[in-house]
Image (spheres, helix red, strand yellow):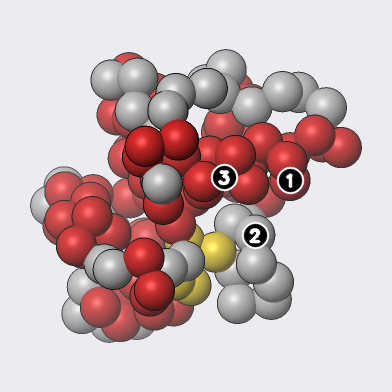
Amino acid sequence: MHDPDLAPRLRVLLEGLSAERLPITYQQAAEALGLAPPRTIQRVALALEALMREDVANHRPLLAALVVSRRGELPRAGFFELAVELGRFPADPALHEQAYREELERLLNPAAGPR
């Protein structure tokens, strides 16, 4: 169930949210996009992966960092796996949370500058 319009719609959604409303959960993203089951979270995750690839290719902070699991304050494992694969995060899982926090800071405070 591939939706080619989903990633661009998700980018618009995330870029339009105020800092006070961030981060949001995968479920909140699915609801805001009006997705209906089945596989709503999987579809959001695939769209986030597309955004990550675009952001890395364009040397931008990972917008996907704004979407977290409802079971905590971090994205799902797939986010970290792809961030490592794309060369954005270190391979050592012990360093992932700090790398994520730095990425989130770059998104929420653009004046903080590049890495």
Label 2, on which residue? 74
Label 1, on which residue? 97
Mark 3 in CB contact with mark 2 (< 8 angstroms)? no
The foreground one among 74 and 102 is 102
Q: Quadrant of residue 49?
A: top left
Lower position in the chain sequence, tag 1 or tag 3: 3
Question: How many numbered marks have been drawn onto this rendered protein structure?
Answer: 3
> SS of the residue at dot 2?
loop
Lower position in the chain sequence, tag 3 or tag 2: 2
The foreground one among 72 and 22 is 22
Q: Is residue 92 left or right of residue 113?
A: right
Q: Quadrant of the N terminus?
A: bottom left
Mark 1 in CB contact with mark 3 (< 8 angstroms)? no
Mark 2 in CB contact with mark 1 (< 8 angstroms)? yes
Label 3, on which residue? 79
Residue type (three-letter) at the residue carrying disc 2: Leu
> SS of the residue at dot 1?
helix
Residue type (three-letter) at the residue carrying disc 3: Phe
Residue 104 image position (x, y, % from top left): 51, 48
Residue 88 image position (x, y, % from top left): 56, 23
Q: Is residue 66 left or right of residue 103?
A: left
At 83% across and 27% down in the image, what residue appears? 92
